[in-house]
Amino acid sequence: MADPLPLRVEGLAVRTRDGRRIVEVPRLDVPAGGTLAVTGPSGAGKSSLLHALAGLLRPSEGRVLWGGTDLAALPEAARARFRREQIGLVFQDFLLFDELGAVGNAAIAAAFAPSRERAAIRSQAEGWLGQLGLGGRAEPSVRTYSGGERQRVAVARALAHSPAIVLADEPTASLDRASADCLIDNLLAVVAGEGCTLIAVTHDAGLARRLGRELRLADGRVMESALG
């Protein structure tokens, strides 16, 4: 497990090439091991903010400080390395490899890790699949999995390398209420047990209530930021 990392955002702005605002966040602080729900209507800039926090999108202005690292200032290769080593990502559209099975997808980080770490990543992947109700599945491909099953594989993949940070885009969107609540329990258990920082974009009021703080966006601007 990497050391927990706090987040500080200062003067963040993401704009289109013609200057149109996508999202602006003047200031945001999340302590190491803290949790944050990012909420708001569709098109509010939630996913763009998450991508900026992950280093997938370079801000037009401002800083994204994970501990002492300004992710926004790093060159692309360094941002990718930081993301690979420190961040577990859950994408809204899963981004699984259909030619691989559940374990192959969940343990994909092992392909990029030093050889001494690969067995542990695979073991972690199998453990998370089991906790998420997908243990022992023998299918050679996830192609036939339901949307909810694919989402759970994506969550196991995000957690398998014991990241310091988990960034999740609508992690419960494809799940029924019982499965969503189980997933929320698991995510919060990771935060409590390992100290990683969790930020989730969500329309799920149940998830937002369980996280420690809510940042509400509308039309790319911060509308509300209050303790839950």
Image (tube, helix red, strand yellow):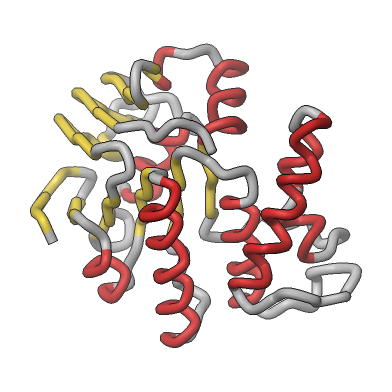
| Residue 218 visible in rendering | no
Which of 22 and 160 lies nearest the eye of the viewer? Answer: 160
Q: How many marks?
A: 0
Is 33 placed above or below 126 here?
A: above
Q: Using the image, determine if residue 87 lies above or below residue 170.
A: above
Residue lying at the far right of the rendered structure = 140
Whether residue 220 is visible, yes or no, is yes
Q: Which of the image's four quarters has the N terminus?
A: top right
- Seen in the picture, residue 157 relative to 12 is either above or below; the reply is below
Q: Is residue 118 left or right of residue 29?
A: right
- On the rendered structure, is 155 left or right of 48? right
Quarter of the image with the C terminus in it = bottom left
Q: Residue at x 19, y 24 (%)?
A: 11
Residue 56 place in picture, x, y as percent: 51, 33
Judged left or right of residue 105, residue 198 is: left
Residue at image x 20%, y 49%? Answer: 219
Instruction: Identify the residue shown where x is 26% and y is 20%.
Output: 62
The one nearer the camera, 36 or 22, is 36
